[in-house]
Image (cartoon, rainbow, N blue to C red):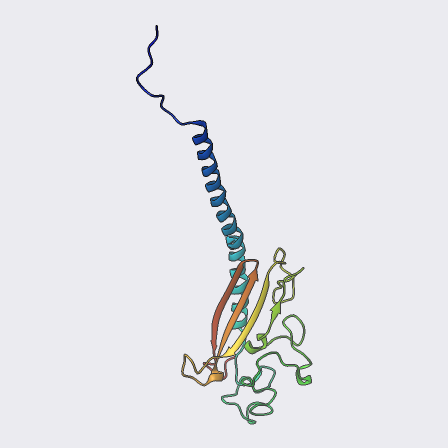
Amino acid sequence: MSTPDGHKQAGISLIELVMFIVIVGVAVVGILSVMNITTKSSADPIVRKQALAIAESLLEEIELMPFTFCDPDDPNASLATTIDSTFCTGGANGANDESTLPLGPETAASVGGAEGRYVSPRFDNVSDYNGFLMSAGPGAIKDITGGAIAGLDAYTASVTITQAGTAPFALPNADVLQIDVRVQSGAADITLTGYRFRYAPNSL
């Protein structure tokens, strides 16, 4: 004749096992959902690096442009030490006065029509790039010759140039230009800022 075991059965019941599986499953789904949202909203590091390369290239191109008292189209541009009719054709606030606002490319017939980055007459000074835009689409990003750069159709690049001599440099406002180059693609959004000083009036 058998006798009952004095020890109770150890372990978990089927209900407890099912509840454990459900709780763990819900937790895993929640973690994966958060990771998915984070991944979607974060910028692809490769895309961000490419956007940075585009911004650096365009900023360097602009900073290497002339910044004189007179527009470089003016025959006296290399000699001017101030803005007046002696040096710049038209004098202060004339068509060749590079401190005249708003900044941007010349459109006057005196320079052969509207200036552009790829077409003649070409951009020939820093301020010409104000408002320049390359919108996303086929052949969006181009080099300075107008040649489309393959693989960059999803990028947009824009340029804003403002006079910035007064603050923080305590100089005449027109003697310093702040150059902001912004490149966007999806979640990647890069802005680089540079400054161009009119440090030598006769330097092109």
Above or below, 202 against 85 in this view is above
Task: Give the tally of numbered discs.
Answer: 0
Which residue in the rendered view is the most extreme toward the top?
A: 1
Which residue in the rendered view is the most extreme toward the left?
A: 6
Above or below, 50 against 66 in this view is above
Quadrant including the N terminus: top left
The x and y percentages for residue 86 are 55, 94
Above or below, 147 against 13 in this view is below
Q: Nearer the viewer, residue 17 or 61?
A: 17
At 52% across and 78% down in the image, what residue appears? 162
Above or below, 139 against 171 in this view is above
The x and y percentages for residue 156 are 59, 63
The x and y percentages for residue 59 are 52, 68
Q: Nearer the viewer, residue 32 or 87?
A: 32
The x and y percentages for residue 6 are 30, 17
Q: Is residue 135 toward the left or the right of residue 178 in the image? A: right
